[in-house]
Amino acid sequence: MLTTTGAASKVHSDSPRRPQPRSMKIHQVRTRLSNSYVVDHGDRLLVVDVGFRCHEYVLGFLEHELGRPASDVELVVCTHDDADHIGGVRHLALACSAAFAIPFASRHSLRKNLNDPTGSLVRLGTSVLEATRPRAWRMYMSPDRQSRLRRRPRKRVTLSSRDVGQLRPSLRLRHGMALPGFEDWSVVHTPGHSWDSCCFHHAESGALLSGDTLLGSSEKDQLVLPSIFSNRRQMRSALERLRALEVHSVYPGHGSAFHGDDLLDALP
């Protein structure tokens, strides 16, 4: 059984949803910046993507929605180093006494610039363009969104900024690597939105936690590519890599989850 919490799931195929392992459930937690995901393996939890100052939403979800102690979280990871995905990872790991891991090139400007020299300029330009579009207001600043967020459970914690700053990742994630303690999840390097971007793939169920490599559009009722990107050529290569996998469910960094057997077909 698979559970998605915080947003409606979209079914993009007439075929039935692929059965999920009995021991695994994926919960979507909508925070003020992006989607966080709590992957429940029964006695242990994996958390993917925590935005800046959003760890309290995840802690509130664990306590109020799942009835689980923070100590059940064993690993916290992020898909890339944008603040809305990595900004609260250290805070949550510290609050849960959990390990955390980040992609190989995250927070490493030299690696990113060597592999994508114009990436920072392209991302800046596309970010400015995106900020002028009405949907940016709806996504982050609309009163309705803020009102909904205020009703969501939060657990406030006091953490030492020094302890947070001194916390170091236990592992740098590379393509093809299994997540430590959650070996049925593998790392897929998918540069395009940013050079360090990764997805996490669960081969048995066909689930993909996509970060900002793929987004869920309720308006278009399908998966879409991000408007903010660093390199279109790399994004095309990343899509080819994803199409080589068995993907039956996509859980994006923004928007709704989608389920079906042809999820990637409509992408350019």
Image (cartoon, grey):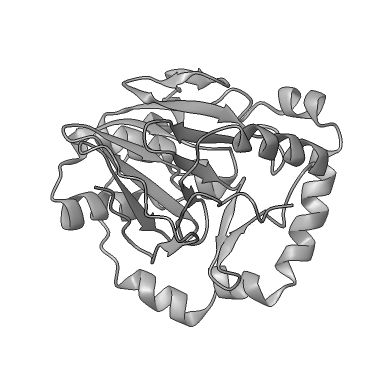
Residue 200 visible at all:
yes
Q: Looking at the image, which residue sits at the far front?
A: 15
Q: Position of residue 166 (x, y in %)?
A: 43, 25
Which image quadrant is residue 29 in?
bottom left
- Could you tell me which residue is drawn at 64 percent across and 51 percent down? 265
Q: Residue at x 74, y 48 (%)?
A: 229
Q: Residue at x 30, y 44 (%)?
A: 19
Q: Is residue 137 left or right of residue 128?
A: left
Instruction: Compare residues 181 and 77 and report the one nearer the observer.
Output: 181
> Does residue 205 lie above or below 141 as drawn?
above
On the image, which quarter does residue 46 sit in? top left
Point out residue 34 in the picture as x, y percentages from the top left corner.
49, 56
x, y percent for residue 241: 65, 32
Q: Is residue 197 visible?
A: no
Q: How many marks?
A: 0
Is 208 rendered above or below residue 185? below
Q: Does residue 205 sit above or below 2 in this rendering?
A: above
The residue drawn where x is 29% and y is 67% is 152
Q: Position of residue 12 (x, y in %)?
A: 50, 61
Horizontal side of residue 249 vs 183, given as left or right: right
